[in-house]
Image (tube, grey):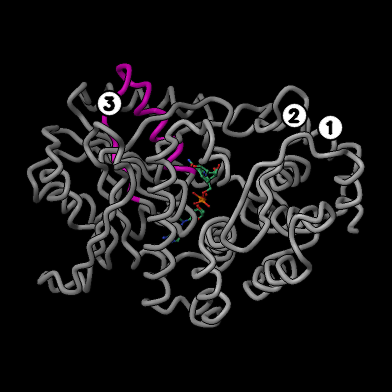
Amino acid sequence: MPGQLHEHTPVRGDKCAIWTDRLAVRFKNRRPIGIHVGHHVLGELGSLLRDAGAGASRIGAVTNTVVAHHYLPPVIKGLERAGYTACPIIIPDGEAEKNLERVGWLCGEWLGAGLDRSSMVVALGGGVIGDLAGFAAATYLRGIGFVQVPTTLLAMVDAAIGGKTAVNHPMAKNIIGAFHQPLLVLEDLATLETLPERQWRDGLAEVVKTAIILDADLFLYLEQNAEDILRRRPESVRHIVVTCAGHKARIVAEDETESGLRALLNYGHTLGHCIEALTGYEEWSHGEAVSAGMAAAARLARLLGLCGKEEAERQRALLESFGLPTRLPRLDPEALMRTLYHDKKTRDGKLRFVLSPAIGQARMLEGVEEDLIRKVLAGQ
Ligand code: NAD
Ligand code: GLY
């Protein structure tokens, strides 16, 4: 059965690791991909790789200047302790690094460092590093193994799980990519302590999305524990990361290449991507744009008579309690409509939206009428 496996080990014996959760993406007829969630567990990467059967001698660890400063040393130490030769590469921070030129440059660095087909790549950072290093690993020598070590909430609950890797093209985001599954995912919740507030809220937008489309209990938990979550209380952080990572693992195991079920994860992303594109990918962060997109999707569901006022209100209130925006920015409605038609999710010129008929449920609606969308854009 594809799906997830969840074991919780309260005490590991290691004096730093307080606890570890083990989940897995279980593809049919394939080795499961372990998702290890713990606290101060970066140093365990080397031994986890050995346990997963990675026979590589050289490991190309890719990270950025911000993350390297905090977290590269324990990763390198752990790799060397397990007998690997670590070849760290540190790139500048930012979404602008997710491009083909950087992929070519990385491949040159790896050639210079002697990485061969048996070598592995470690992506240490947020979704930008995971997408970039993952895509480079998918193409270097026609594909070498890689490991995701996400250090943002967004990457832990979403980007690092599922094998989507990509870089941007000047004309579109994430348009050059590949499905390339990591050998394993290591999530150290202690790294979230240094995450800036805005990035924390960005990740919360994806957590709320997961709750709206898949998990009414999680939604209730978020409503009742918003304060603890905003303060990043360890037990709340663990609960939301493990729950969301588990949902993501189950969905991608059932629909690896997004032929159906996985598309539901795009709730709020249709309008969200338009906001990001029309504001130059700088003014609005991804999570903020998705938040406004989800609130708009809830209004659309109401206009269609698909969900009641209370459902839409609960979504808006939860997003606002996390300090996330629920109103679309002032944008030219014609430009927004044009961008909507260019979206990756549009099929045969028909606009498609993921909508939620009730908290914990979602479905794809195709051929949504333009005038309804215009009403939502006008804030009705
Ligand atoms: P990011 O990778 O840019 O990280 C956000 C910021 O936080 C950066 O400045 C980064 O240096 C910093 N940072 C990372 N970890 C930190 C830590 N522990 N402490 C302090 N600072 C830290 O952004 P993101 O939100 O993680 O990811 C966004 C990217 O992910 C986008 O490019 C998006 O397209 C992609 N994405 C991919 C998928 C997928 O399925 N592959 C899913 C969602 C998003
Ligand atoms: N982030 C959506 C997906 O992985 O499919």
Which residue does the numbered mark 2 point to in the structure image?
342
The Cα–Cα distance between marks 1 and 3, rounded to whole angstroms, is: 39 Å
**Relative vertical location of residue 96 with respect to residue 221 in this rendering, above or below:** above
Which residue does the numbered mark 1 point to in the structure image?
338
Q: Would residue 222 be counted in the magenta stretch? A: no
Question: Taken as a whole, is the magenta stretch helix, strand or loop?
Answer: helix
Q: Residue at x 90, y 58 (%)?
A: 380
**Position of residue 212 measured from the top left corner of the image (x, y, whole percent):** 59, 60
Q: Is residue 224 left or right of residue 8?
A: right
Front position in the image: 46 or 334: 334
**Position of residue 333 measured from the top left corner of the image (x, y, whole percent):** 90, 43
Give the residue type that dot 1 points to: Arg
**Label 1 environment density (alpha carbons within 10 Å; few <14, some 14–19, many ≥20):** few
Q: Residue at x 40, y 46 (%)?
A: 160
**Label 2 environment density (alpha carbons within 10 Å; few <14, some 14–19, many ≥20):** some
- Asked if the residues shown at circle 1 and circle 3 are in contact, with their CB atoms under 8 angstroms apart, the answer is no
**Label 3 environment density (alpha carbons within 10 Å; few <14, some 14–19, many ≥20):** many
Give the residue type that dot 3 points to: Ile
**Relative vertical location of residue 218 with respect to residue 349 in this rendering, above or below:** below
The quadrant of the rendering that contains the N terminus is top left
Q: Residue at x 58, y 45 (%)?
A: 264
Give the residue type that dot 2 points to: His
Q: Is residue 7 left or right of residue 132?
A: left
**Relative vertical location of residue 141 with respect to residue 54 in this rendering, above or below:** above
Question: For the residue labelled by badge 3, is the local secondary structure a helix, a strand or a loop?
Answer: loop
Question: For the residue labelled by badge 1, is the local secondary structure a helix, a strand or a loop?
Answer: helix
**Relative vertical location of residue 286 with respect to residue 147 in this rendering, above or below:** below
Residues rendered magenta in the picture = 128-149
**Position of residue 305 measured from the top left corner of the image (x, y, whole percent):** 81, 56
The image quadrant of residue 132 is: top left
- Asked if the residues shown at circle 1 and circle 2 are in contact, with their CB atoms under 8 angstroms apart, the answer is yes
Q: Is residue 21 left or right of residue 259?
A: left
